[in-house]
């Protein structure tokens, strides 16, 4: 079964950045993209990234996004934690945004995610046709 590994690289007061990999059964990395998350704020809902850990993920329809997305399950004190496209931390409420690289799109000195929709599609394509998997957040 293919699964995800999110390796956080930098925690800042305004954002958390990292790398998200799709890994096959033998441990081979199929796809690797960058990530953008909210800063660590003690797992406070809607303002913090989630705690490190291993979580079940399911490919489900999101009424908020009106499309199928991967959702993390059984995150302590949290619900509706998705992997979705977002270029700015202000578009996140505790979710994980894949991106192709980081930059400052709007000049506000807060790191942004570039080409997030393309990165999300890479993750989706690499995990297909699975509907269930796991993500390890390190």
Image (tube, grey):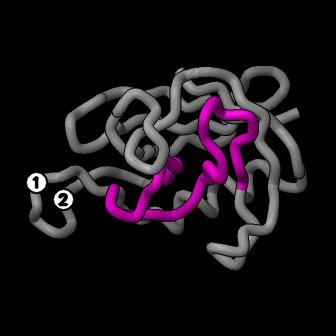
Q: Alpha carbon of mark 1 to alpha carbon of mark 2: how far?
A: 6 Å
Depicted 50 relative to depicted 104: above or below: above
Q: What secondary structure is marked by label 2?
A: loop
Residue 78 colored magenta? yes
- Horizontally, residue 95 falls left or right of residue 66, namely left
Image quarter of residue 31: top right
Q: Which residues are magenta?
A: 70-97
Image quarter of residue 61: bottom right
* Percent of width and height locating residue 136: 65, 26
- Sequence-wise, the earlier of marks 1 and 2 is 2
- Horizontally, residue 122 falls left or right of residue 25, namely left
Residue 32 colored magenta? no
Depicted 113 relative to depicted 48: above or below: below
Q: Are marks 1 and 2 in contact (CB under 8 Å)?
A: yes
Comparing labels 1 and 2, the label whose residue is closer to the camera:
1
Q: What secondary structure is marked by label 1?
A: loop
Q: Which residue is mark 2?
A: 104
User: Which residue lies at the image location 89% right of the left edge and 55% below the top edge?
Assistant: 129
Q: Which mark is residue 57?
A: none
* Percent of width and height locating residue 85: 51, 64
Label 1 packing within 10 angstroms: few (<14), some (14-19), many (20+): few
* Percent of width and height locating residue 112: 28, 56
Q: How many marks?
A: 2
Image quarter of residue 105: bottom left
User: Which residue lies at the image location 51% right of the left edge and 34% below the top edge?
Assistant: 50
Q: Which residue is mark 1?
A: 109
């Amino acid at each position: 079964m293919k699964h995800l590994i999110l390796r956080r690289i930098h925690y800042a007061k305004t954002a958390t950045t990292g790398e998200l990999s799709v890994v096959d059964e033998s441990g081979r990395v199929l796809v690797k993209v960058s990530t953008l998350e909210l800063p660590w704020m003690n797992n406070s809902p809607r303002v913090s990234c989630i705690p490190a850990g291993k979580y079940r993920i399911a490919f489900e329809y999101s009424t908020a996004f009106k499309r199928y997305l991967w959702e993390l399950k059984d995150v302590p004190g949290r619900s509706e934690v998705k992997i979705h496209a977002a270029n700015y931390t202000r578009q996140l409420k505790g979710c994980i945004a894949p991106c192709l690289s980081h930059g400052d799109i709007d000049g506000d000195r807060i790191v942004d995610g570039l080409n997030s929709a393309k990165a999300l599609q890479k993750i989706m394509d690499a995990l297909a046709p699975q509907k269930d998997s796991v993500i390890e957040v390190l």
